[in-house]
Amino acid sequence: MDKIEIRDEHDVVLARTAARDVAGAQGFSVMAKTRIATAVSELARNVFLHGDGGYMEYEVLREGNKIGIHCRFVDQGPGIPNIEQAMQDGFSSIATLGHGLPGARRLVDDFKIHSEPGRGVRVEIIKWN
Amino acid sequence: MTTTVTNKATANINKILDTVLDAAPIGFLLVDSQGRIKHFNKHCEGLFGFTKKELLDKPIETLLPGQLRESHVGMRDNFITEPWPRMMGAGRELFAQRKDGSQFPIEIGLGPVEIEGEMYVTATVIDITEKQQHDAQKKARLEQSHYEELMQLSSPLLTVWKGIKVLPLVGTLDSIRTQDAMEKALTCMAEEQIRVLIVDITGVLTVDTMVSDHLIRMATAVRLMGGDCILTGISPEVARTVTQLGVDLSTLHTRATLADGLALGIKVIETGRGF
Amino acid sequence: MQSIPVLKIGPVLLVSIQTELHDSLAVNLQDTILYKIRDTRARAVLIDITAMEIVDSFIARILSETTQMASVMDARVVLVGMRPAVTMTLVDMGMTLPGIDTAINIEAGLFKLGYELCAIRQDGHAVREPALMETVDGQD
Ligand SMILES: Nc1ncnc2c1ncn2[C@@H]1O[C@H](COP(=O)(O)OP(=O)(O)OP(=O)(O)O)[C@@H](O)[C@H]1O
Ligand SMILES: [Mg+2]
């Protein structure tokens, strides 16, 4: 798995361009490429904005003739006390739009989020072409 | 209908027949009333992989897959009691077995002959492996083109005016189909710099909350791209259900008929100001 | 510090985003546009995002906020050239940018604002003097 540290906003750009480039290199459709890159942008931003920084790991998946991209976001921040609430459209602890998490979930094929209060958040996504 | 060959003629004709039959590109077998193979042509050797010696006087069942052998004995007795020419196993897939045990699909024609007072059965055998493969390919190609036709049918984009496209939606609108139609329409808008997309739902069977949601998403996407979306073909029934379901279509520009929608679209193009 | 050029063509500001927008660059752009509206008394802003392959919720928010802020300053913002894939991604995320003005290309954007590209004179004023134009002339 390749790894990108996410400490500031420039790393958010790095993470999403990496996702876009990998998807492009693997022959993803423009639609699928844009969706995965945008989801990565949302989750990477949450890592640096809410999670005090962390990293993204990513790899290419092959199943039969399906090709996918798997990304994992890990931070050691405060965690999310109420995941169900955070996954709702329009919930935000910082009075923004709160579209990030629910939006990212709709953009990918597989979405897992895990958090222990005080011990950070871990999000895994998979997007198939 | 039984063919009788007289004694005298036999000797002469046999030679000629052998030559003719060996030249034929189909398998030919002569079987006696006990089911023993009495004669066969060259093509059969290649077909089944047996030599003349190995096959002569052997039961015809030698050439059948194991599980068919027993039942075949009964069937050939039936044929002897009702002897007229026919295609064997009409409507069923028939298989023969080669010496090496491999099987292949065949077509068989049967005809009774009487030679010197004895009943025989002639069988013509055709290997239809290639024909079947060909048929399957043809079927697959047909299905593919039907499918493509359907996909196109479901979202043909019609140019009706410079800068205006019409997307007539028909049948049942599921998520995949609407998504597909939406992607095509938006890509086309970007490529051809289309200003107005008219979505006509005259042919849509039911408009429920899900379909309404798809339509609203489509209109939103068109607006974000810088175009204007007009929804037309709204029947009284659709207007009623949509209202009763509490769906808010007020963000969409709707017209009862395609003609009205087109008129609106042309106005939008000409003023250039959008809605 | 990297920044995005804001051009003035008559009473219209033209912004074409050609680089990857990181968050502070986006915030920065918002500032630049608002100050430029005040300083040049521009009445409209065309933001061309044809080159943008990714617009996430943050950038979308900045764009929609900028529109509202400009409108408070009496300038109209038109967002130009959003790519189909970007559009569908935003719709999927539920970011519908209500109230934002859009156009398929810069020409259509100018047309929407009441300016015809071909009719803009050397001095940057439109020949066809639409309502918007007259007000600007009056102020000048
Ligand atoms: N990595 C994280 N660590 C801690 N809290 C998080 C993390 N990710 C999300 N959250 C919490 O979940 C809420 C919802 O996140 P979401 O991304 O949906 O919205 P947002 O970041 O507030 O706004 P937007 O993403 O629309 O700009 C956040 O406000 C924050 O409280
Ligand atoms: Mg977020």
Image: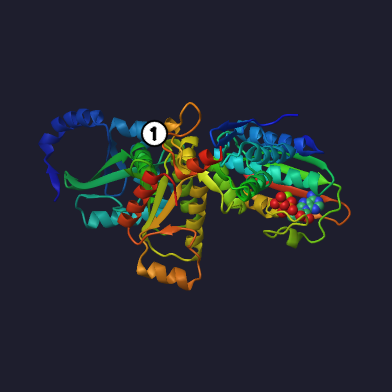
Q: Chain of mark 1?
A: B
* Picture quadrant of residue B135: top left
* Residue under the image location 48 percent in, 53 percent down: B219
Disc 1 residue type?
Phe
Q: Is residue A72 something one can see in this rendering?
A: yes
- In front of the other: B234 or B34: B234
Percent position of residue B213, x then y: 51, 60
Total of numbered circles in the picture?
1
Q: Is residue A77 left or right of residue B165?
A: right
Q: Is residue C37 left or right of residue A7?
A: left
* Picture quadrant of residue B5: top left
Q: Residue furthest bottom?
A: B244
Residue marked by disc 1? B50
- In front of the other: B161 or B22: B161
* Residue under the image location 41 percent in, 47 percent down: B196
Q: Quadrant of the N terminus of chain A?
A: top right
* Residue under the image location 85 percent in, 51 percent down: A120
Percent position of residue B204, x then y: 38, 60
* Residue under the image location 63 percent in, 42 percent down: C55
Q: Quadrant of the C terminus of chain A?
A: top right
User: Element at badge 1?
Assistant: loop
- In front of the other: A103 or B149: A103
Please determine whether, in this image, residue C55 is positioned above or below residue B255.
Answer: above
Q: Residue furthest right?
A: A118
Q: Is residue C104 something one can see in this rendering?
A: no
> How many neighbours does mark 1 have within 10 angstroms: few (below 14), some (14-19), or many (20 or more)?
some
